[in-house]
Amino acid sequence: MLNAGGVSYALQRLKSAGSRSPTQEDRKVANYVLARINPRDKVSALAMADLAIQWNDLAMWNQIVKASGAEKSLDMIGKDKLIAAWDKFSFENVRLL
């Protein structure tokens, strides 16, 4: 289904998972999206940043920041997501520069 539906299908599937802890299948779908994030894909970066915070996954957060180019342009994820990540992971773990 991922190959047929692509990133938009994967993001919808992850969104429907709600606030529960991620399953192994959720992680597979998330990894599919993470492998496709790039600096031109703000929608995916924002959605995955939300998941990283929700799942309390600092490694995933860092992967999103690097893949999306957010370390060079805060506009990619926005100030609100950055503050939420600081609250969740601490400033020292989330510094972008």
Image (cartoon, rainbow, N blue to C red):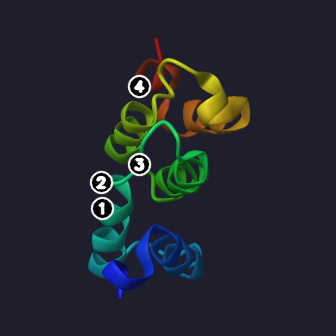
Instruction: Say which residue label 2 marks.
Output: 35
Q: What residue type is disc 3 on?
A: Ile
Task: Select label 4 or label 3 by which is in front.
Answer: 3
Q: Against 58, is 7 above or below?
A: below
- Regarding mark 4 in the picture, which secondary structure is present there? helix
Q: As drawn, is 55 to the left or to the right of 60?
A: right
Distance from the alpha carbon under mark 4 to that under mark 3: 21 Å
Of all residues shown, which one is farthest toward the top?
Answer: 97
Please identify the quadrant where the N terminus is shown.
Answer: bottom left
- Regarding mark 2 in the picture, which secondary structure is present there? loop
Instruction: Say which residue label 4 marks.
Output: 93
Task: Determine the residue positioned at 57% across, 56% down.
Answer: 47
Q: Are marks 2 and 3 in contact (CB under 8 Å)?
A: yes
Q: Are marks 1 and 3 in contact (CB under 8 Å)?
A: no
Distance from the alpha carbon under mark 2 to that under mark 3: 6 Å
Distance from the alpha carbon under mark 1 to that under mark 2: 6 Å
Badge 3 crowding class, 10 Å Cα cut-off, few under 14, some 14 to 19, many 20 or more, is many
Q: Nearer the viewer, residue 69 or 85?
A: 69
Instruction: Say which residue label 3 marks.
Output: 37
- Sequence-first tag of 1 and 3: 1
Give the tally of numbered discs.
4
Any part of residue 82 in sight: no
- Sequence-first tag of 2 and 4: 2
Q: Nearer the viewer, residue 86 or 49?
A: 49
Instruction: Say which residue label 1 marks.
Output: 31
Q: What residue type is disc 2 on?
A: Ala
